[in-house]
């Protein structure tokens, strides 16, 4: 999906891909391809464009916590009291 956002004379443009996988080690990933930010006069965009951020790519992934992965593999027993485990880590965000 192409995304274009205009704020005054500042234009943010990119191609975004968002993927959600319900039963995966990486349930959410987002990729921005050809991300660029530039300023211009909207009446003459091609002639007045001035790059603020040159085109780049950005990827972000949300990973399941290791404790959740161990539960899926059946390592040990789990029960109602396991929700209070102090060393359990939350999902990890990678940028």
Image: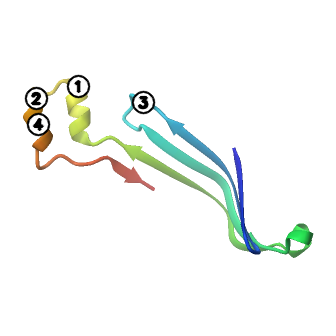
Place of residue 35 in the rendered image (x, y in percent of width and height, measured from the top left) = 66, 59
Mark 1, Cα crowd under 10 Å, few <14 / some 14-19 / many 20+, is few
User: Which mark's residue is nearer the viewer, 1 or 3?
Assistant: 3
Question: Which quarter of the rendering shows the C terminus?
Answer: bottom left
Give the residue drawn at x 42%, y 37%: 27
Residue designated by label 2 = 79
Q: Secondary structure at mark 4?
A: helix
Question: Which quarter of the rendering shows the N terminus?
Answer: top right
Residue at mark 3 to residue at mark 2: CA–CA distance: 22 Å
Residue designated by label 1 = 73
Q: Secondary structure at mark 1?
A: helix
Place of residue 66 in the rendered image (x, y in percent of width and height, measured from the top left) = 24, 40
Name the N-terminal-most of marks 4 and 3. 3
Q: Nearer the viewer, residue 59 or 5?
A: 5
Residue designated by label 4 = 82
Q: Is residue 53 above or below residue 25?
A: below
Q: Nearer the viewer, residue 8 or 36?
A: 8
Name the N-terminal-most of marks 1 and 3. 3
Q: Secondary structure at mark 2?
A: loop
Name the N-terminal-most of marks 3 and 2. 3
Residue designated by label 3 = 22
């Amino acid at each position: 999906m192409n995304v274009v956002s205009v704020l005054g004379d500042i234009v943010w443009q990119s191609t975004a891909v968002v993927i959600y996988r319900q039963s995966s080690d990486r349930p959410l990933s987002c990729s921005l391809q050809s991300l660029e930010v530039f300023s211009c006069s909207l009446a003459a965009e091609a002639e007045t464009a001035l790059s603020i951020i040159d085109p780049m790519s950005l990827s972000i992934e949300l990973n399941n916590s290791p404790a959740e992965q161990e539960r899926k593999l059946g390592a040990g027993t789990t029960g109602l009291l396991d929700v209070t485990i102090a060393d359990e880590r939350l999902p990890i965000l990678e940028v």
